Amino acid sequence: MEKQKVLEAYLSGLDKKIRETEKALDSIYEGVYTAPKPSESHSDTTRSQQSKLAIETERRLSSLKSTRAAAGQIFLQKVICPTVGALIAIEDIGFREIEYYFVVPGQGGESLFLDKTEIMFISLQSPILEAVSGTKEGDSFDFRGRKLRLVAIS
């Protein structure tokens, strides 16, 4: 699996989320502006709800932009320990399948398919990353009742 392809797909996904969130925020602001005026019924509730939603969406947008800025600083050189930007290949020894994890800044928990292979995005606080810490390529380890082997970190 090419690390550059994974990084490009991750950045593209972040860019798409940023655009979608900006569009949603514009729509929310439009709702605030068109909500009933203070002299009209239900105005306090509608404007208040829309304003709260706008604040939460602005926070989400800010978080996405911060994550995008940090991800844009990921270097493609090989790494020897699990850190942001590491692409980790782990074999499930029982099933003889290789799983790929890409360590991202901020929050993980999502995945995408590249060339029919699933790449899971994980954060530095991910349990699987904690299990990998201290192992070297070729080492086996147990994780949640599964016997795994660290194939590669790049």
Image: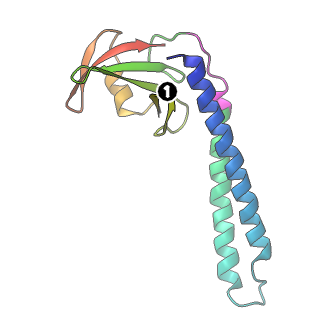
Q: Nearer the viewer, residue 63 or 121?
A: 121
Q: Which residue is mark 1?
A: 103
x, y (%) of residue 91?
31, 19
- Rate crowding at label 1 as few (under 14), some (14 to 19) or many (20 or more) other CA atoms within 10 Å: many
Question: Please, what is the three-letter code of the amino acid marked with disc 1?
Answer: Val
Residue 52 in sight: yes
Residue 65 in sight: no
Q: Nearer the viewer, residue 69 or 8?
A: 8
x, y (%) of residue 6?
56, 24
Q: Main structural element of the magenta stretch: helix, strand or loop? A: loop
* Residue 152 in which image quadrant: top left
Q: How many marks?
A: 1
Depicted 132 relative to depicted 126: above or below: above
Q: Secondary structure at mark 1?
A: strand
The coloring applied to the image is rainbow
Depicted 80 relative to depicted 48: above or below: above
* Residue 68 in which image quadrant: top right
User: Which residue is at a point 67% across and 78% down the rendered structure image?
Assistant: 46
Residue 74 on the magenta segment: yes
Residues in magenta, as a range: 69-77
Residue 92 on the magenta segment: no
